[in-house]
Image (cartoon, grey):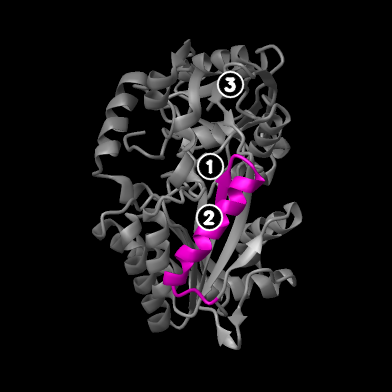
């Protein structure tokens, strides 16, 4: 990247261009544990589609890499400038343009935070269902990785709610895509095909009422068997989470506010299921709960704990969301996020636990049962430098085993650069490579990620 290119970028009206010491360290990494820092030559903070178009036209002509960045909350290195060049920050494009209650859509810029999307939908009596754990991620990042989360089993992923998108191609061309075409070309492509500058999201009617239930189990196998029965029933839980007892205990100690049970009648809890039942109103939910109580007699759970007040629901979700943040208290930690056929969750969990027993470190996990997404953490008392090699071997072994079990080793976080070697050879990799060659022949968009040859 030359000073001439930087000079051209500075001539774009309203575009903030940062260089040298003006570039903060946050632009050099995301939240991938143990990741290295990669500094760009420039950070450009855009506020309009026109600015993005002009920037890409310049960078395409000059052969300068462009890495798009939202909030930087990813955990696969997807927004990290591994090839240098320009980091294009869209955080300033954070305007909710319109909510159409009749059509049940919301049109917005990519820098709007997920938590604000959800809050705005609720203000209009509507709901945006995708619910990945990081609520301070941008909607553009969610679209980029086709984010999912605990509600994916019933409600689907981000792709199911993209009704349209405005994108800018590598050469600066601006185009608008409809739902089907937009999903194929944009959602989940992690910024290697185009830059999303506006999205129209589909909303749904908000559930009239809901209740959260906790089902503790003395054995993890019984919990997984119960989860499979619940998933196959007609209860249609909006959420069905498997939570490892070791993780619940670890997180509760870190936060100092344990919410989930660790024992029942003196017996240790090895795993807990958390589920949400929804209905048109409180009476419907109450009736559903009574039916579930009868059904649960066959599940071998130790108890049924009910969260029916707003404060209890918030407490349950806060404790669940603390799983990730509590890991920061560990001396050393590594995470693997993979997606498997739900019936294979027990296989990957027992395999990961066996690796921990062999290696002398603790393995803890939780899973979105219906979608098969699982988060596995390895925690060690060794210093980070001493645990690094074992952590890398652990992550590699779990992802390899995941692929053998018919799963997706890239998981919910996306491919980025961290999961690239596990993504190669897949049908989706081949399709994205073909689209990349057609839409970005110079390979300037997010090089070093998802597809090779950049």
**Could you say which disc has been placed on residue 28 in the image?**
none
User: Of label 3 and label 2, which has the lower sequence position?
Assistant: 2
**Neighbour class for label 3 at 10 Å: few (<14), some, many (≥20)?**
many
| Distance (Cα) linking label 3 and label 1 | 31 Å
Determine the residue positioned at 55% across, 22% down: 199
Closer to us: mark 3 or mark 1?
3
**Could you say which disc has been placed on residue 105 in the image?**
3
**Could you say which disc has been placed on residue 35 in the image?**
2
Prevailing secondary structure of the magenta residues: helix
| Distance (Cα) linking label 2 and label 1 | 10 Å
When the figure is inspected, residue 245 is found, relative to residue 205, above or below; the finding is below
Q: Quadrant of the C terminus?
A: top left
Do tag 2 and tag 1 residues touch (Cβ < 8 Å)? yes
Determine the residue positioned at 50% across, 60% down: 292
Q: Nearer the viewer, residue 46 or 413?
A: 413
Closer to us: mark 3 or mark 2?
3
Q: Nearer the viewer, residue 309 or 254?
A: 309
Which element type, helix, strand or loop, lies under badge 1? loop
Q: Is residue 433 visible?
A: yes
Determine the residue positioned at 45% across, 35% down: 190
User: Of label 2 and label 1, which has the lower sequence position?
Assistant: 2
Do tag 3 and tag 1 residues touch (Cβ < 8 Å)? no
The single residue placed furthest to the bottom in the displayed view is 266
**Neighbour class for label 2 at 10 Å: few (<14), some, many (≥20)?**
some
Q: Nearer the viewer, residue 280 or 189?
A: 280
Determine the residue positioned at 66% across, 12% down: 11
Residue 214 sits inside the magenta stretch: no
Which segment is the magenta one? 275-302
| Distance (Cα) linking label 3 and label 2 | 37 Å
Residue hosting label 1: 80
| Side of 43 where 293 appears, left or right | left
């Amino acid at each position: 990247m030359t000073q001439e290119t930087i000079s051209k970028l500075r001539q774009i009206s309203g575009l903030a261009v940062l260089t040298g010491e003006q570039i903060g360290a946050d632009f050099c990494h995301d939240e991938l544990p143990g990741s290295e820092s990669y500094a760009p030559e420039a950070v450009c903070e855009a506020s309009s589609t026109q600015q993005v178009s002009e920037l890409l036209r310049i960078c395409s002509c000059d052969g300068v890499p462009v890495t798009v960045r939202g909030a930087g909350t990813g955990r696969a290195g997807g927004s990290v400038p591994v090839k240098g060049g320009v980091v294009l920050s869209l955080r300033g494009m954070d305007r909710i343009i319109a909510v159409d209650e009749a059509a049940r859509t919301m049109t917005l810029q990519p820098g709007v935070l997920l938590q604000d999307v959800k809050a705005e939908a609720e203000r209009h009596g509507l709901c945006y269902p995708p619910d990945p754990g990081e609520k301070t991620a941008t909607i553009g990042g969610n679209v980029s990785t086709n984010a999912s989360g605990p509600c994916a089993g019933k409600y689907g992923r981000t792709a199911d709610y993209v009704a349209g998108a405005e994108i800018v191609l590598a050469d600066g061309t601006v185009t608008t895509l409809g739902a089907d075409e937009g999903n194929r070309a944009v959602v989940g492509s992690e910024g290697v095909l185009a830059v999303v500058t506006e999205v129209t999201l589909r909303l749904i009617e908000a559930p009239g009422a809901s209740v959260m239930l906790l089902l503790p189990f003395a054995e993890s196998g019984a919990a997984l068997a119960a989860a499979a029965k619940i998933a196959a029933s007609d209860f249609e839980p909006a959420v069905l989470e498997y939570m490892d007892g070791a993780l619940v205990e670890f997180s509760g100690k870190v936060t100092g506010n344990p919410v989930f049970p660790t024992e029942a009648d003196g017996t240790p809890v090895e795993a807990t299921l958390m589920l949400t039942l929804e209905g048109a109103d409180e009476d419907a939910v109450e009736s559903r709960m009574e039916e579930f109580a009868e059904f649960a007699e066959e599940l071998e759970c130790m108890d049924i704990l009910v969260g029916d007040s707003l404060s209890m629901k918030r407490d349950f979700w806060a404790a669940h969301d603390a799983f990730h943040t509590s890991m920061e208290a560990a001396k050393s930690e590594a995470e693997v996020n993979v997606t498997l056929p739900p019936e294979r969750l027990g296989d990957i969990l027992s395999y990961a636990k066996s690796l921990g027993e062999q290696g002398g470190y603790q393995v803890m996990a939780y899973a979105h049962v219906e979608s098969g997404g699982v988060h596995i953490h390895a925690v060690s008392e060794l210093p980070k430098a001493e645990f690094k090699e074992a952590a890398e071997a652990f992550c590699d072994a779990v992802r390899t085993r995941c692929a053998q079990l018919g799963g997706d080793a890239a998981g919910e976080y996306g491919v980025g650069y961290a999961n690239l070697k596990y993504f190669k050879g897949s049908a989706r990799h081949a399709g994205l490579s073909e689209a990349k060659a057609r839409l970005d022949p110079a390979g300037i968009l997010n090089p070093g990620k998802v597809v090779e040859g950049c």
